Image: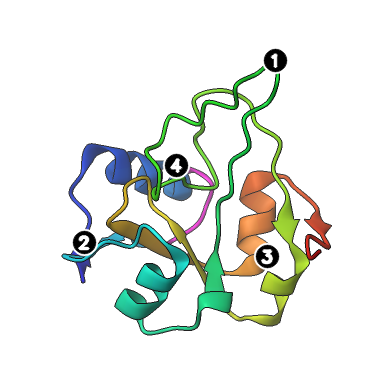
């Protein structure tokens, strides 16, 4: 793990800092594209990964501006509807994608809610 250098990851770091979140966006040699990949690289459980699932809207297309496996919870190319899984609240820290399939950042659930402006939802089936 090393500090991220990719321009997209640096933009995420700047957005986090501008939101008052002191999180370091980090980069791995191996991919963090899937929840399992990210958990293995970080050394945490899959449950501690703030997963991004993107659905294409009939009219909107839901373009995020990120590549698959790197969809961050902030800084989307256009407005998207976000849902936060209330199960993340059980952890002191969770990990979210940092804009590329190799970058992530740690954040508290409260900070995640604050910077996304989204309420907690029960997203289980």
**Residue identifier under label 3:** 110
Whether residue 93 is visible to the viewer of this picture, yes or no, is no
Give how far apart the Cα atoms at labels 4 and 3 are. 16 Å
Q: Using residue 72 as the reference point, say whether residue 101 is left or right of it.
A: left
Give how far apart the Cα atoms at labels 2 and 3 are. 24 Å
Verify CB contact (< 8 Å) between mark 2 and mark 3: no
User: What kind of element bears circle 2?
Assistant: strand
Rendered location of residue 103, percent (x, y): 31, 57
* Dot 1 alpha-carbon crowd within 10 angstroms: few under 14, some 14 to 19, many 20 or more: few
User: What kind of element bears circle 3?
Assistant: helix
| Mark 4 or 3, nearer chain start | 4
Give how far apart the Cα atoms at labels 2 and 4 are. 16 Å
Rendered location of residue 94, percent (x, y): 54, 71
* Dot 4 alpha-carbon crowd within 10 angstroms: few under 14, some 14 to 19, many 20 or more: some
Whether residue 97 is visible to the viewer of this picture, yes or no, is yes
Q: Nearer the viewer, residue 26 or 30?
A: 30
| Mark 1 or 3, nearer chain start | 1
**Residue identifier under label 1:** 59
Residue drawn at the location 53% of the way across and 46% of the way down? 19
Q: Is residue 17 above or below residue 65?
A: below
Q: Which residues are magenta?
A: 18-23
**Residue identifier under label 4:** 15
Rendered location of residue 40, percent (x, y): 35, 79
| Mark 2 or 3, nearer chain start | 2
């Amino acid at each position: 793990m090393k500090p991220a250098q990719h321009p997209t990851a640096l933009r995420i770091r700047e957005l986090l800092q501008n939101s008052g979140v002191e999180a370091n966006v980090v980069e791995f040699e191996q991919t963090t594209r899937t929840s399992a990949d990210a958990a293995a690289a970080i050394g945490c459980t899959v449950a501690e990964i703030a997963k991004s699932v993107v659905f294409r809207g009939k009219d909107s297309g839901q373009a995020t501006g990120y590549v698959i496996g790197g969809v961050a919870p902030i800084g989307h190319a256009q407005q998207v509807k976000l849902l936060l899984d209330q199960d993340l609240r059980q952890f002191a820290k969770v990990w979210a994608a940092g804009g590329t399939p190799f970058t992530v950042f740690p954040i508290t659930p409260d900070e995640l809610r604050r910077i996304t402006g989204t309420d907690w939802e029960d997203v289980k089936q």
